[in-house]
Image (cartoon, helix red, strand yellow):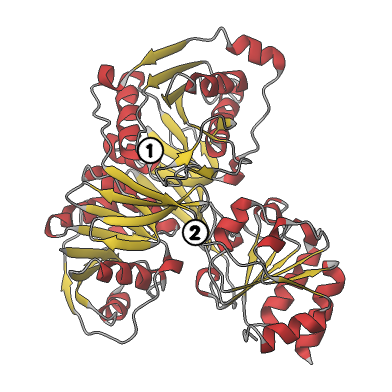
Amino acid sequence: MRALVIAEHDNRHLKPATLAAAEAARQLGGGVDILVAGARCAAVAEAAAAIPGVETVLLADDAVFEQALAEPLADLIAGLAGGYDALLAAATAAGKNVMPRVAALLDVQQVSDIVAVVSPDTFVRPIYAGNALATVRSADAKKVITVRTTAFEAAAGSGAAAVKPVAAVADAGLSQFLERRVTESVRPELTSARVIVAGGRGIGSDGAFALVSQLADILGGAVGASRAAVDAGFIPNDAQVGQTGKIVAPDLYIAVGISGAIQHLAGMKDSKVIVAINKDGEAPIFQVADYGLVADVFEAVPALIDCLNR
Amino acid sequence: MKVLVAVKRVVDYNVKIRIKPDGSGVDTANLKMSMNPFDEIAVEEAVRWKEKGHAAEVVLIGIGPQAAQDTLRTGLAMGADRAVLVKTETETEPLAVAKLIAAVAKTEKPDVILLGKQAIDDDSNQTGQMLAALLGLPQGTFISAAKPDEAGRITVIREIDGGLETLSLATPCVLTTDLRLNEPRYASLPNIMKAKKKPLDVTTPADLGVDVAPRLALLKVAEPPTRKAGVIVGSVAELVDKLKNEAKVL
């Protein structure tokens, strides 16, 4: 059993999601290599080489991989697959984009978003917005897997893997990168934050959403949102927590003015401590909250900020 | 331009599912079924392209039992022109679904294939990407905007972790929809009546020469661990005290 983990990065930094995929790969029980495909991304390869348990870093450093377009990246991964029994990536927007394409090129039925490795061919994955956990056994000779990052804790320690260059693939020119607008933020990344303060429809307006951000900043946390808050334009889409948005599991999740639709709960119910502040005492969010405060958010949140500032 | 849209019949998003007591699966008998919400967005986008003159024809494809016809009729009532049902009683996995759509696409020759980014039942998020691979086409996944241009390419905005990405794709191409692409319409009663007369062809995996045998064996379906009931605190001060001294997260 040999596994290849696809590193996620921005050509400068390795994304922490990669560590979760590497841990799932380690649990398969065989050797683990990691692929860094990008442009001028030697620093990423260096970071990947330090992940404990990684034997070799395959470095495909070429302009064709600069924007991680799915078409050339999938061709590269499928071309390297011959030497591996399993291919893994984090179930992030990037991993979800490329891995099914790889799986189809290899005629493999991918196993998406695994939360546990039962054995090298058997995995647990959530279905129906996390309202059920399915245990599935793959009959494919090769496994293609995406990993729910909140379910696998990065192994401690540090390694010293060898870095081996691999050849690039030709770009068929199917898609062309035009632009990427990344929300600049000094706050921690949502999926790896220790504390998240999330706002919902109950916040009522764009301006009032600043209360949520203020509370997040005092706690050194990230800002999240329900779909309703994103749809209302209070905050950009990449803050959406839920079944089809980001899956998070921080130490502390404070839900402000969020009613708690099952689609939202699917994204945050594995948080260690959940606090809900909502004026509707019947809101379903209180059923998953460790601490509930039935109160007007416009009174409770400023009071909370005040209390924490003291 | 011809647009092919894939639609899946799933348990309605408002329904709380029940796990069979023997853990063999999810009990979907007698539950309200609807079109997968992301597929509704895909149908809406295609119909809007038709209304704007970008698309000449909108064809739907559905894979499933006879009852999946109802979902296709819903899409026809939204404004699609005709539909193809690939009838099968077997639970089809994303790879098999992608192969079936690819087989139909080879005869239909669409310029764009639109799908929802994921179905809300098995949450796999695979079919569109697999279809693009099988047909050797470019893919634009998780899109929140799409615009066909004069040169026959499509410019899409994709929702990615941390922001938005803009790509220009050659056609034919495969697109998968995210939530903010549009807000799907409700079909009007006259359109629902009209949809009953629109053409709906039925084929089967065997007719298309596609092997749909599952690759994944479902061993068990279990309830997720439930959180123990929490407490309602009386004040902000009490909340802060509990977070500091009981939960120890502050």
What residue is rendered at 26% in x and 71% in y? A26
Which residue is tagged 1? B170
Mark 2 and mark 1 on one chain: no
Q: Position of residue B133 (x, y in %)?
A: 29, 41
Which of the pair B46/A24 is nearer the observer? A24
Q: Is residue B143 visible?
A: yes
> Which quarter shows the N terminus of chain A?
bottom left
Could you tell me the amino acid type at mark 2? Arg
Which residue is tagged 2? A180
For the residues labelled 2 and 1, the Cα–Cα distance comes to 19 Å
Which of the pair B4/B19 is nearer the observer? B19
> Which quarter shows the C terminus of chain A?
bottom right
What residue is rendered at 43% in x and 24% in y? B61
Placement of B157 over or under A155, stated as above or below:
above
Q: Position of residue A233 (x, y in %)?
A: 71, 54
Q: Is residue B1 visible?
A: no
Question: In the visual, does B204 lie left or right of B18?
Answer: left
Callout 1 crowding tier (Cα within 10 Å): few <14, some 14–19, many ≥20: many
- Specify the quadrant of the image occupied by residue B78: top right
Q: Disc 2 is attached to a residue of which chain?
A: A
